[in-house]
């Protein structure tokens, strides 16, 4: 028999059929499903046509299930239970709707942003476990695309974001500063012109990190290639090297509170000024996931709180 089951017999028709068989008549089935009696009758009629054998006997306006209908009911119950298990397993494999949320973040966001979001999430969803992965912009985006992470916190200023497939929730803008050892002699009365630091040694993040692209662009504008003594894979290692006097670097302002006493920070002169836009990014086809909805809601609250704390003088 050439039966196109995907077009002819749908799960919706099977659900209506099972409701009818349970309730015993069209009116009660329609009420249980919040449908009209006409819709229930039409679904049963077309199902009978699609199965291609009699399922009901007509007695006045009532439909009386035949033995074939009871046989079909047994298999309907099996197939719907199997599909429910399949959907659950598929969601588990994808990490959707489970008691665990896999979040990727830049190292620098673990100082304030990530703890604030985690605390808020614990209030919203106390039973939710959050797995935290730290890495570069490039690495985190790749892990998100491969479904190894559910959401990431990155700088979208330096990233190619596929807005058709990815949902982006902006959190805040962050300025980039020149950072130098506390012992260095700086022109603190003016904005930092990178050309004045042509002879200095620098340390840098490796390629793929959020600040790396801005670092390269700033020195391209300055017209010289800085002497980079080492490249590292996290911002804390980079700033430890600055503290130790190994070299200068460019760093986001969110690191200022931690290194205020041991690292000098100067605002860059106008040609080199740049900002990072920090955002939560997740797959658009996961936008109805309750865990991601909670994360997005918490992200909006966090962004709003930062806006409310900004004063005209700042």
Image: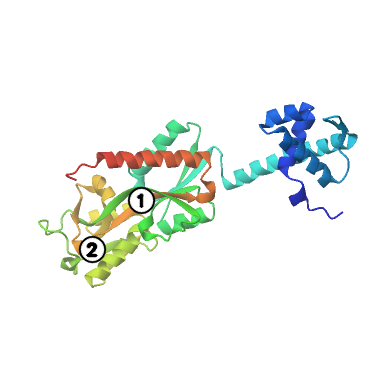
Horizontal side of residue 188 vs 2, given as left or right: left
* SS category of the residue bearing label 2: helix
Residue 272 circle label? 2
Horizontal side of residue 309 vs 164, given as left or right: left
Whether residue 226 can be seen here = no
> x, y percentage for residue 278?
35, 51
In terms of depth relative to the viewer, which is nearer, 266 or 314? Answer: 314
* SS category of the residue bearing label 1: strand
* Residue at image mark 1: 278
Q: Is residue 247 above or below residue 280?
A: below
Residue at the outermost front position: 60
Residue at (31%, 62%) from the top-left corner?
214
> x, y percentage for residue 23?
76, 27
Q: Quadrant of residue 183?
A: bottom left
Q: CA distance from mark 2 to mark 1?
A: 19 Å
Q: Quadrant of the N terminus?
A: bottom right
């Amino acid at each position: 028999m050439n039966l196109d089951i995907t077009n002819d017999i749908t799960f919706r028709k099977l659900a209506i059929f099972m409701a009818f068989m349970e309730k015993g008549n069209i009116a009660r089935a329609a009420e249980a499903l919040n449908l009209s009696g006409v819709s229930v009758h039409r679904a049963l009629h077309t199902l009978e046509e699609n199965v291609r054998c009699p399922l009901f006997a007509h007695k006045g306006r009532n439909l009386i299930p035949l033995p074939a209908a009871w046989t079909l009911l047994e298999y309907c119950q099996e197939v719907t239970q199997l599909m429910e298990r399949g959907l659950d397993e598929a969601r588990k494999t994808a990490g959707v709707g489970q008691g665990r949320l896999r979040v990727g973040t830049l190292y620098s966001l673990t100082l304030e942003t990530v703890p604030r979001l985690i605390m808020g999430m614990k209030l919203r969803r106390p039973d939710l476990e959050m797995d935290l992965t730290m890495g570069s912009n490039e690495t985190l985006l790749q892990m998100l695309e491969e479904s190894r992470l559910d959401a990431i916190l990155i700088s979208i200023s330096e990233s190619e974001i596929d807005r058709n497939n990815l949902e982006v929730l902006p959190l805040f803008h962050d300025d980039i500063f020149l950072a130098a050892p506390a012992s260095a002699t700086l022109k603190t009365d003016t904005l930092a012109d990178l050309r004045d630091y042509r002879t200095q040694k620098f340390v840098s993040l490796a390629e793929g990190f959020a600040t790396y692209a801005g670092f390269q662009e700033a020195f391209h504008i300055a017209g010289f290639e800085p002497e980079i003594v080492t490249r590292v894979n996290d911002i804390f290692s980079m700033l430890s090297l600055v503290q130790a006097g190994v070299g200068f670097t460019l760093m986001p302002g969110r690191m200022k509170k931690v290194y205020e006493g041991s690292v000098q920070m100067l605002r860059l002169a106008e040609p080199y000024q740049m900002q990072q836009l920090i955002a939560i990014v997740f797959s658009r086809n996961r936008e109805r996931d309750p865990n991601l909805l909670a994360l997005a809601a918490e992200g909006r609250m966090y962004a709003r709180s930062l806006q409310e704390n900004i004063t005209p003088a700042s």
